[in-house]
Image (spheres, rainbow, N blue to C red):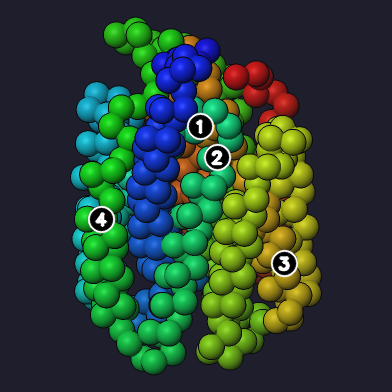
Amino acid sequence: MDDRPKMSQATCKEENAPAVRTLVRYRLAASAFYFIQGFVVTCWVSRLPDIKERLSLSDGVLGLVLLAPPAGQLAAMALSGWLVRRFGSFRILCIAGLLLPCWLPVLGLVSARAGLIAALVFFGMATNLSNISVNTQCVGIEHLYGKSIMATFHGIWSLGGIGAILLSSFCAVRGISPAVNFLFCSALMILLYLANFRRLLPQDRRTAGDGANKVRLASLLTDSRLWILGIISLGCLGCEGVMNNWIAIFFQKFVTAKAEFIRLGLFTYMLSITCCRFTADRFVRKWGGRTVIQIAGCLILAGISLIVLIPSLFTAAAGCILTGMGTSVIVPVCYGIAGKYESVPVAVSITMVATVGFLGFLFMPAAVGVLSELAGLKTALFLTGLVSCAAAQLIWKAGKA
């Protein structure tokens, strides 16, 4: 049910212009926070080859180190959902949106494995707090617009990622250390934060579930719709984590790319995600989110298969594009569907789907590191695509919003 205030025909024209300006302001501000998150997270992962070499990490050890950020995210899930529901996404995002870029330089300064792991756990917690609050913001803004725009927000995240890759690649080729690279990126994102934090949506969207003082844990744990959406997100986020953390290393080992092309796979992957997320909403409105998710799962498997079977520079880059097309839309659509379940508060439904989803982000990059030691990186990547595709095909069991 649309809970927006109705306007008479006499006042519609007068009131519409400022209302539109307000909606645009909310959308631009939320987009800025998506950009900050994408820029900061991708800035870190794009310098992974340099950090791996500096700390002399094997594939297996790197896989264990990569457990740290999603472990922090998982540990903060319940707390993030409670904080957003208790204090509102506006207040929490104002804190998390500043904390995330401020912590980035620490990742470039630590010189020991234990220190890096500890810093990455806190980094993951800050990322999760930002993720839950900004997605809650975006569900409310999408409701005000009255149409699907969630994928566009995630496209802004990817746009920030592309900017981070380009800047980090420039720094890496010029021999600029990750510490200096991260410090500069942090300063840029803090300026973007200061220009936008006052323009966020002040009140979250309320559903029927928000009227209850308490949401019964048992009812959430038996809600098959949320579990299915979580499993689908698990496959997609797991694949996304693997691509973010391992594709540059794959290019370094198997594509034997020159130094300036090591990050080509990550760049084409992020570029594909960005372009598709800015166009995905029209396909969701035309075909429905469930059909789009199933197609996306097949694209992930096709893309990763191309990467591992024909690891030349051109074909591997093309595989990264297909994989990016697949991963671009699944999580935004899952969050959008979860946010429409009237019986569950928005922050709670998104938190539950994100919690299950981030198990994939937690374990799959680490699992790839372990499997790489046992069966090779190619086999590990292929299994990632297979899991992601299989999970996406479950969408028709998620039920109606």
Q: CA distance from mark 1 to mark 3?
A: 35 Å
Residue drawn where x is 24% and y is 61% of the image: 190
SS at mark 2?
loop
Sequence order check, earlier mark of 2 and 3: 2
Sequence order check, earlier mark of 1 and 3: 1
Which of the labelled discs sits on residue 149, or is there none?
2
Q: CA distance from mark 4 to mark 1?
A: 23 Å
Residue drawn where x is 28% and y is 51% of the image: 196
Location of residue 104 in the rendering, given as x and y in whole percent from the top left corner: 27, 64
Front residue (pair 359, 183): 183
Q: Residue beneath label 3, please?
A: 319
Q: Within 10 Å of the Cα at label 1, are there few (<14), some (14-19), or many (20+) other Cα atoms? A: some
Which of the labelled discs sits on residue 195, or is there none?
4
Residue 343 higher or lower than 30, as above or below: above
Sequence order check, earlier mark of 4 and 1: 1
Which of the labelled discs sits on residue 145, or is there none?
1
The residue mark sitting in front, 2 or 3, is: 2
Determine which quarter of the picture holds residue 4: top left
Q: Quadrant of the C terminus?
A: top right
Q: CA distance from mark 2 to mark 3?
A: 27 Å
Is the residue under label 1 in contact with that under label 2 (CB below 8 Å)? Answer: yes
Q: Is residue 388 left or right of residue 362?
A: right
**Kind of residue indicated by mark 4:** Ala
**Kind of residue indicated by mark 1:** Tyr
Q: Within 10 Å of the Cα at label 4, are there few (<14), some (14-19), or many (20+) other Cα atoms? A: few
Q: Is residue 175 left or right of residue 323?
A: left
Is the residue under label 1 in contact with that under label 4 (CB below 8 Å)? Answer: no
